[in-house]
Image (cartoon, grey):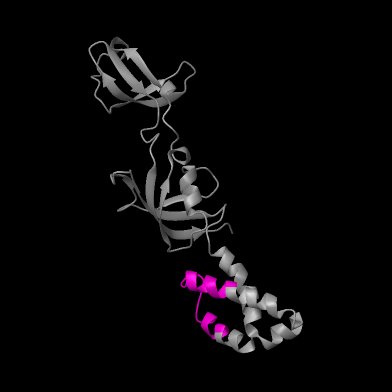
């Protein structure tokens, strides 16, 4: 048992959770299991004194947990978003990384969930169902209006986005999805509503509250 710990200690001393995440996790879990078994034969004080790895793991386990993205962290990520057919609808390539705080609902829920638990430098590809992205497409948000209700200087085109203001003063964006000589069809759903989205994500930096 002691020889096995000494061998693992030599390996673990060369690893860090940031650089060797998967291997470090395996060693960590194996050592914890062995220590649980060994605790029946050693008192904690004698065990810690005889096997330095026990003390190393005790101090490193908190560092290991803190190396992952958690709620409340501010993160900077690069991403590329694609539709089912591979069409790229958005990307941070060539721009500054996207910065947001996990748990603050600043991005779609599925994106937050995908980033949580990642480490700095880690990349991940994840498919987010419509329900965790921009929601399902709602037919009640599609309306047909007489064409003469549009301002006279607007010639509708499919895909055109218009800003509509309600009597309450609140405004929202609608998309023209169809039109003819008499009517115009407006869709108030988000353009990506009803679509499953695939994101390639890279965590560039984890910024923790001081």
Q: Which residues are magenta?
A: 8-29
Q: Is residue 60 magenta?
A: no
Q: Position of residue 115 (x, y in %)?
A: 48, 53
Mainly helix, strand or loop, the magenta region? helix
Residue 131 visible in the current orientation: yes
Q: Position of residue 125 (x, y in %)?
A: 39, 54
Identified at 64% across, 88% down, the residue is 2
Instruction: Indicate whether 131 appears above or below 149.
Output: below
Q: Is residue 20 magenta?
A: yes
Picture quadrant where residue 157 is located: top left
Identified at 44% across, 55% down, the residue is 76
Identified at 42% across, 64% down, the residue is 121
Picture quadrant where residue 46 is located: bottom right
Say which quadrant the N terminus sits in: bottom right
Asked whether, in this view, residue 73 is left or right of residue 136, the answer is right
Instruction: Indicate whether 164 appears above or below 43.
Output: above
Instruction: Indicate whether 208 appears above or below 24.
Output: above
Residue 151 visible in the current orientation: no
Identified at 45% across, 18% down, the residue is 166
Asked whether, in this view, residue 42 is left or right of residue 4, the answer is right
Asked whether, in this view, residue 4 is left or right of residue 81, the answer is right
Q: Position of residue 208 (x, y in %)?
A: 55, 58
Please tell me how many numbered marks the rendered image carries: 0
Asked whether, in this view, residue 165 is left or right of residue 152, the answer is right
Say which quadrant the C terminus sits in: bottom right
Q: Position of residue 8 (x, y in %)?
A: 56, 83
């Amino acid at each position: 048992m002691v020889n096995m710990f000494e061998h693992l200690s030599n390996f673990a001393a060369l690893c860090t959770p940031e650089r060797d995440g998967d291997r470090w996790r395996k060693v960590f879990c194996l050592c914890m299991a062995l220590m649980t078994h060994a605790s029946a034969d050693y008192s904690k004080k004698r065990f810690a004194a005889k096997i330095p790895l026990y003390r190393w793991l005790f101090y490193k386990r908190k560092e290991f947990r803190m190396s992952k993205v958690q709620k409340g962290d501010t993160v900077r990520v690069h991403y590329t978003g694609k539709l089912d057919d591979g069409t790229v609808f958005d990307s941070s390539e060539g721009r500054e990384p996207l910065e947001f705080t996990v748990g603050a609902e600043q991005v779609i829920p599925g994106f937050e969930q995908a980033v949580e638990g990642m480490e700095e430098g880690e990349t991940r590809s994840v498919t987010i169902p419509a329900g965790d992205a921009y929601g399902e497409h709602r037919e009640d948000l599609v309306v047909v209006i007489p064409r003469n209700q549009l301002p006279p200087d607007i010639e509708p085109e499919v895909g055109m986005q218009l800003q509509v203001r309600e009597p309450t003063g609140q405004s929202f964006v609608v998309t023209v999805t169809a039109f003819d000589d008499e009517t115009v069809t407006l869709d108030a759903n988000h353009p990506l509503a009803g679509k499953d989205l695939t994101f390639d994500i890279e965590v560039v930096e984890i910024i923790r509250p001081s």
